[in-house]
Amino acid sequence: MSEILNVSGLHAGYGAGDVLVDISVSVSGGEAVAILGANGAGKTTLLRSISGLLKSRGEVVFLGQSLSGRPPYKRARAGLAHVPQGRGTLSHLTVAENLWAGAHASGRERKEIIAHWFDVFPRLGERRNQMAGSLSGGEQQLLAVARAMAGNPQLVLLDEPSLGLAPLMVKSVFAELKRINSEFGTALLIVEQNATASLSIADRAYVLEAGRVTVEGAAADLAANDHVRRAYLGI
Ligand SMILES: Nc1ncnc2c1ncn2[C@@H]1O[C@H](COP(=O)(O)OP(=O)(O)OP(=O)(O)O)[C@@H](O)[C@H]1O
Ligand SMILES: [Mg+2]
């Protein structure tokens, strides 16, 4: 598959010096790519730069078009969804209303999209009238993913989907992500501290250390890399 996202020479920060230095990252159509990194490595900063929430320097090309200067909503309309750290569901709205907000379509098509995602995730369908804020952490993560998917994206950026979830729930959320990736062919770019979970579903991965990419390669190769094993897999 050809490349759908190409980030090159990216620098970004918050005023006092760059947090991200000369980052190059790519994602091909249908690919699942993981970015591993410790607290403060710059993972969230990278996703915010790609989705346009944070100003950056360098090139971000999506589906052959430069995204420079384009606001976040236009990037979303172009097929680039972002599930932020902490999930970003609208807690005072119901599950159905959250999906409604994620679907860019209108009228009948919008209703069909929502029904489709309730079919894919029956656990959400059963809770369609429940306030999003009263869902369990795992259910909120699923809702955040379903809301992103309701916009029919080509690529979903996921910021620490495992955060705050118990180990069994981490497994279940990653299994659903894998299912979305294989059933619908949606490409995923997942930033994670949980290297085991993210490498288990990724095709390729990058390691981000102090704002720079230090290792990259096939997920299986990274899982066998001594430095990655010691620093991120605790082996
Ligand atoms: N709004 C901000 N203003 C100033 N500095 C910030 C801001 N947000 C993040 N930073 C700094 O940028 C660096 C990278 O932060 P970032 O949130 O991207 O890391 P992260 O890899 O996502 O970490 P975590 O795993 O804890 O979420 C940190 O040193 C952080 O203090
Ligand atoms: Mg973060």
Image (cartoon, rainbow, N blue to C red):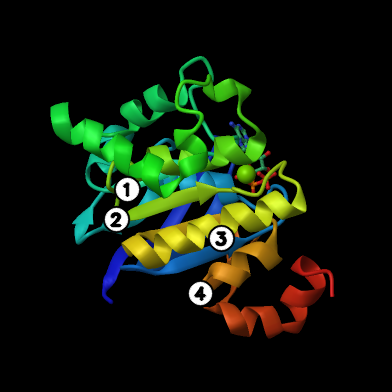
> Which mark is drawn over residue 175?
3
Residue 127, compared with residue 205, is above or below; it is above
Residue type indicated by callout 3: Ala
> Badge 1 is on which residue?
80
**What amino acid type should be assigned to the residue bearing mark 2?**
Gln
| Type of amino acid at the residue the image marks with label 4 | Arg
Q: Quadrant of the N terminus?
A: bottom left
Find the distance from the CA under tag 1 to the CA under tag 3: 21 Å
Q: Residues within 10 Å of mark 4 (few under 14, many from 20)?
A: many
Give the image location of residue 152, x and y in percent: 27, 47
User: Do the residues bearing badges 4 and 1 touch, measured as CB atoms within 8 Å?
Assistant: no
Helix, strand or loop at label 3? It is helix
Real-space CA distance between mark 2 and mark 4, rounded to the nearest whole angstrom: 17 Å
Tell me whether the residue at label 3 lies in contact with that at label 2, contact meaning CB atoms closer than 8 angstroms. Answer: no
- Kind of residue at badge 1: Leu
Question: In the drawing, does residue 44 fall left or right of residue 157?
Answer: right
- Residue at 62%, 55% in the rendered image: 172
Which residue bears the numbered disc 2? 154
Q: Closer to the observer: label 1 or label 2?
A: 2
